[in-house]
Image (cartoon, grey):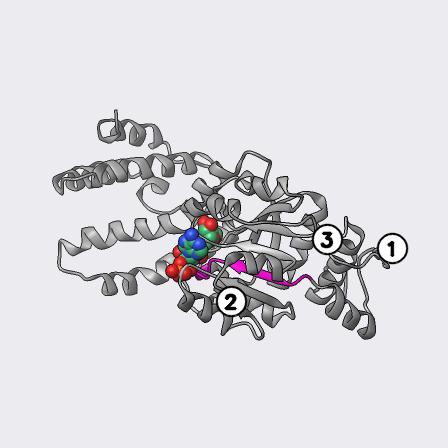
């Protein structure tokens, strides 16, 4: 089995760790956690499953909550309850997790579960958590990448463990998210006593835990957009420009998809600068100049966006072992098109 803890091992270690830690779950009879790799006997695992596995609760039943609830339920965790703004959303989540109760009041979720996920929009996290009562045996996390964990401070003041659990993934709301999520990273921020348990939940999703320094969340999240939603904005720019010669969105996406996938694969294989192609990589300054002029004719900020992206491409090209000599000339061409 190697050193990589599988979901069952990770769950068991989580249970044992939690049993040791400040009574987060009621298991004081267990006194030591085994070192990795954990090799549970089926009887021990059964005992751990039935007595020690944390029950999970969700407040907010949107895209993230539905996917996590379905995945953890499949992995053997008990999703004890869900509450959401609309009962219909909560019922949708409950349908994905056997025995999950739909509660009208979020407090009932806190009372029913060991570990509560607050999965409402970021702007509602603090008020949602602030309205709840927690005991010292509870843990509560939010799933926002940008927002500080301190939004849950009211729970911490009542003795609960608090943390951040941010999957670096774009949840579309599709059922397929559960499978697509496998392999993603999940950024954790929590005290050690909670982090071990959260790591086990990450492994149960088939994901990898990631840590960032305290205080880095906002920049970490802002820049992660370039690997998710901003790719969509980039594609939208292609769609908008091609619309000028009568090509629709579906046709554009069909046409560019193999190039997009090929670019991502090349980046994995050769690194970002190694994968760079296009006029900048060849040092074709005249082409860049003509493209900027034509984009300017389109009006709006088409030329500005192109100039900013081209400046990034020049930086990438400079990282190559043999950069084209025309990079300084291209940089100079960009200046009139960049924001003041
Ligand atoms: N989507 C992503 O790709 C993604 C990725 C990583 C992290 N996240 C984070 O995950 C969290 C949830 O995001 P999401 O994309 O799942 O959002 P979402 O799809 O918009 O779902 C939010 C859910 O919370 C419910 N809700 C809203 N206000 C509420 C309140 N005051 N009390 C109780 N329930 C309330 C919503 O209402 P209804 O009950 O009316 O449906 C909805 O079910 C956010 O912190 C977000 O930053 C999102």
Mark 2, secondary structure of its residue: helix
CA distance separating discs 3 and 1: 14 Å
Q: Earlier in the sequence, mark 2 or mark 1?
A: 1
Q: Give, as a single range, the part of the protein colored magenta.
A: 54-63
- Badge count: 3
Against 191, residue 169 (above or below) is below
User: In the visual, does 334 lie left or right of 184?
Assistant: left
Q: Secondary structure at mark 3?
A: loop
**Ligand 1 falls in quadrant:** bottom left
Cα distance, mark 3 to mark 2?
A: 28 Å
Report how far apart the C-alphas of labels 2 and 1 lie in the structure.
35 Å
* Vertical position of residue 149 compared to residue 10: above or below: above
**For disc 1, does the CB lie below 8 Å from ligand 1?**
no
Which residue matches tag 1? 31
- x, y percentage for residue 183? 57, 60
Label 2 packing within 10 angstroms: few (<14), some (14-19), many (20+): many
Where residue 24 is drawn, which disc sits there? 3
Disc 2 marks which residue?
178
Q: Quick one: label 3 or label 1, which is nearer the N terminus?
A: 3
Q: Nearer the viewer, mark 2 or mark 1?
A: 1
For the residues labelled 2 and 1, say whether their Cβ atoms are less than 8 Å apart.
Answer: no
Q: Nearer the viewer, mark 3 or mark 2?
A: 3
The image quadrant where one finds the C terminus is top left
Q: Which residue is found at the position 52% from the left and 47% from the top?
A: 129
Residues 289 and 32: in front is 32
Q: Dividing the image into 4 quarters, which one contains the N terminus?
A: bottom right
Whether label 3 lies within 8 Å of ligand 1 gets the answer no
């Amino acid at each position: 089995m190697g050193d990589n803890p599988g979901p069952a091992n990770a769950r068991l270690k989580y249970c044992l760790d939690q049993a040791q830690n400040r009574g987060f779950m009621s298991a004081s009879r267990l006194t030591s956690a085994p070192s990795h790799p954990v090799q549970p006997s089926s009887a021990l695992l059964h005992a751990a499953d039935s007595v020690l596995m944390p029950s999970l609760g969700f407040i907010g039943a949107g895209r993230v909550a539905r996917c996590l609830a379905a995945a953890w339920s499949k992995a053997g965790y008990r999703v004890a309850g869900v509450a959401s703004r609309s009962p219909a959303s909560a019922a949708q989540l409950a349908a994905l997790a056997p025995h999950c109760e739909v509660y009208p009041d979020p407090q009932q979720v806190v009372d029913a579960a060991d570990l509560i996920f607050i999965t409402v929009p970021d702007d509602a996290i603090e008020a949602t958590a602030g309205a709840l009562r927690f005991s010292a045996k509870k843990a509560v996390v939010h799933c926002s990448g940008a927002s500080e964990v301190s939004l849950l401070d009211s729970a911490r003041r009542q003795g609960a463990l608090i943390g951040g659990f941010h999957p670096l993934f774009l949840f579309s709301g599709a059922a397929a998210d559960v499978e697509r999520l496998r392999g993603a990273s999940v950024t954790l921020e929590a005290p050690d006593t909670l982090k071990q348990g959260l790591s086990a939940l990450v492994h149960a999703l088939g994901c990898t835990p990631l840590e960032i320094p305290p205080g880095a969340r906002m920049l970490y999240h802002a820049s992660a957009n370039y690997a998710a939603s901003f790719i969509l904005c980039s594609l939208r720019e292609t769609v908008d420009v091609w619309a000028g010669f009568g090509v629709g969105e579906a046709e554009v996406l069909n046409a560019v998809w193999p190039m997009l996938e090929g670019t991502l694969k090349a980046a994995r294989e050769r690194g970002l600068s190694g994968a760079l192609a296009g006029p900048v990589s060849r040092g074709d300054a005249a082409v860049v100049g003509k493209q900027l002029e034509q984009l300017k004719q389109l009006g709006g900020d088409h030329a500005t966006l192109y100039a900013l992206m081209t400046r990034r491409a020049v930086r990438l090209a400079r990282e190559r072992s043999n950069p084209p000599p025309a990079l300084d000339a291209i940089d100079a061409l960009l200046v009139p098109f960049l924001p003041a």
